[in-house]
Amino acid sequence: MSGISSGVGLATGLNINEIVDAIIGVQKNALVKLSSRAQAFEATEGGIKTLEANLLTLKTAVQKLNQESTFETLKATSSDTQQFSVAANSTATAATYQLQGLQTATNHQVISNGFPDTDTTPIGTATTITISNGGELNQSRLLEELNNGAGVQRGSIRITDRDGQTEIVDLSKTLSIDDVVNQINQSATSVVASIQNDHLVISDTSSGSGTLKISEVSGGKTAADLGILKSVVGPSFDGDSVYRITEEFKLSQINDGNGITTVSGLDDFQILASDGSTFDVNLDTAQSVGDVVDLINNHASNGGNITAAVSSNGQLTLTDNTGGAGSFTVSALNGSLAARELDIETTGTGGVITGTLSGGLNSVLLRNLNGGIQSGGPVLNAGSVYIEDGAGGNATIDFSSAKTLDEVIDLINGNGSIQIEASLNQAGTGISIKDTSAASGTSIEIQDVSGNLASTLKIDTLLADNKHTVDSGSLDLRYVNQNTSLETYGKNGTEIPSGSVRIIDRDGTSFVVDLSDPETTKTIGDVLTKINDAAGTAGAQINARLNDTGDGFIVESTGGSSFDVKIEEVSGGSVAASLGILGSGTTGITSRQTTEISIEATDTLADIAEKFNASGVASATIIDDGTAFNSSRLSITSSRSGAGGELILESDYDFGFSTSVEAKDALIRIGSNPQTSFLLTSSTNSFDDAITGLEIDLLSVGDAPSTINVARDTSGIKTTIKSFVNSYNSFVDATDSLTGFDPETNQRGVLNGNSLIFNITSRLEGLLTKKLSVSNNSIKSLSELGIVFNSSGKLQLKESTLDQKLADDPTAITEFFQQEDHGFAVVMDEVITSMTDPFTGTLKAQTDSLQASALSLNTRVAELNEILEARRQRLIEQFTLQETLVNQLNSQQTALNRLNASSDK
């Protein structure tokens, strides 16, 4: 059978494809017209979607004009950008401040003695270096704590020594009483300041015979507030008392900042009057010293028998008014330490009990040494001590009245029978006793006669010990207590994360302690309570308490012997490691704020530096000072900035560490007048909590205050208005493109002649030029803000007009855009929404109609295509059949011709 694969019939020679296409093409004209109409609908729909996209962009810009934050956002600026970097957040308020940077925060740095080389010569002695950031016995008070909390008006004082030499000393930058003493002692006069208990002592070291005088400068009251506004003929004078505990003091501020330890839900102490009457006191609700006084005086069972008060010298005083013949005593109940920490756990004398609540201006209470009475260490009992100097001079000194370390030192130094000098040791964590008799070949002796003061202070020594100087080493001042915050307990002052720990006692009993609730886990005391409660519930032989060295706590075994005590993390947490209790121990595990570095006799300077770097609390480098001998030195830098990062380094080996960079907090003054301003500190150079809503970074010390201005961010408002103008102009560009006509190409925009665009642009233009009914407002139209139409139908912004309005009345601009129901942004947002709403908008109705029409036409086109294709197939089949018939006829004709040819022969 003959084929037509080439489109041309072999039998007929006809181009069948062309013939079929021609026949179908005539019938396809109607389909092309339908398809063109569908494409037109789709193009129109695409144009409307483009229009809608531009309207939505404009809507976003309009909505920004209706946001409160657009006009209420504040911006902070500094007049001295070299001194401060400032930023305002959402909680800031418009105001102007005067700030001056007085000092930037520093990291403590110390340098050792020189060593022969870096990595060859070993130090030759095994030792341990302890590193801590607390435990110093000189606890200087802040000036704001003085004068019953009224503080000190900062300014300058004039000092005149007995030789007539005068100098003005600037105390406007001093933060603590120690700062005051240091500034006075650095003056060029012969005047020396020192601290004694609750006041300053001013002494003259010159040989003059004139008047020793301290006076005010420029009408200030700094000297008076410091208690040293005096003039005397003698060589010294005692200042007035400037520090004492009052009823307003929080309990967390007394007892060297350790507060008091109560027993929740139980009575803390019992008061026994001399007439035999008693009552028990519960301090659960007490927050201040005044609360303690009130709980005693107002106790239902007191009835006026006992009067509690804070005396004029700051002591807690209990007076027995019963006049009985018995003893007047206060005794602890239920294991509470509160009475002892208030210093009233005793028997009264003459019907009075007095408790010392503070170490004074810069000393510490004896009861807080050796870990304090909250630890398991020995209780200090101050009695009599025998002291003999190198020359044989001796005295037995009664220390029973001493409550503070300074009082112990003063009693030793004030005894004329011995040539002994007592002072704080070089590290500031202990006491040093030095023989000043200049006797050769002899030593000093210090022994307890009664009590245990010498042994507890670790200064007891015999003549046979052959010592001319006795250094107690660290006296383990309690500075971590029940109230210590977990926010700063971690290494280098970091916060302890939340989580749980698993503790296993020596018998293998395991229990989990949940420390994940931030509301109930805020302090070390909370941690101890939760451990002990969980241990009790589990029946485990574990007890948690403050440690014996004053710098942390211990989780210890109370029984069992099979295993070590073990503490583990739970669910991949890190709370145990952060608390310093991760691991195991035979009798327990101790958490300390102190880091110990073990030094071997074979260690070189490089080895020691490596161990410091591995500690995580300090970094070490080796420097060469350039000298001919022993030029290699260790330079140790604290990892923690600010005063809290001061490194207290102690070791039996004399490394000769000396401070090269002091540990200092950043210090700023708020206010331009030192007499009325106040100072703020930060361990970093950031003061984000100094002024509400302001993030302040100190960049450098300033010679003068910087003006910090917090005002409405007009640049942000301008940016938002410009964005609105640009969005509208983009909309105009889009409409021009959609409705335009190019005469050169004879091309029209897809929405050319469409009434929809005309209606939309007319509504928007009308609103943009309309004077709105914004009540009680000076601005009624966009043109008053400098927003007007140009000749091309676009908006333009006259920035000078807007700037003037922003400067004159920014509130009126806010009202114009945002007034309820009438504001421009409110109304325009409603108009655009009516056009673009995805359910009810004008554009939605148009696109739905166009989509329906296009779909209907495309459906009909598809149907017609199927019909025409079927017709094409029929025609091809018919032509194919025709070819077959013609071919058959041709074959028959050929056969006949052959027959005819044969018959002719």
Image (cartoon, rainbow, N blue to C red):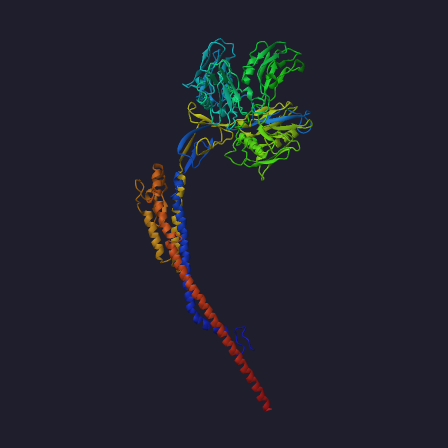
Q: Position of residue 444 (x, y in %)?
A: 63, 13
Residue 481 picture quarter: top right
Camera sees residue 315: no
The relative height of residue 897 versus residue 241 in the rendered view (above or below) is below
Residue 49 picture quarter: bottom left
Camera sees residue 536: yes
**Quick check: 762 left or right of 666?**
left
Q: Position of residue 771 (x, y in %)?
A: 30, 45
Nearest the camera: 381 or 576?
A: 381
Question: Which residue lies most toward the front here?
Answer: 276
The relative height of residue 462 versus residue 874 in the rendered view (above or below) is above
**Quick check: 805 left or right of 391?**
left
Q: How many circles with numbers are drawn on the protein?
A: 0
Nearest the camera: 433 or 96?
A: 433
Q: Quadrant of the C terminus?
A: bottom right
Q: Quadrant of the N terminus?
A: bottom right
Q: Position of residue 834 (x, y in %)?
A: 36, 51
Nearest the camera: 372 or 715?
A: 372
Residue 552 picture quarter: top right
**Quick check: 614 left or right of 840?**
right
Q: Position of residue 774 (x, y in %)?
A: 31, 43
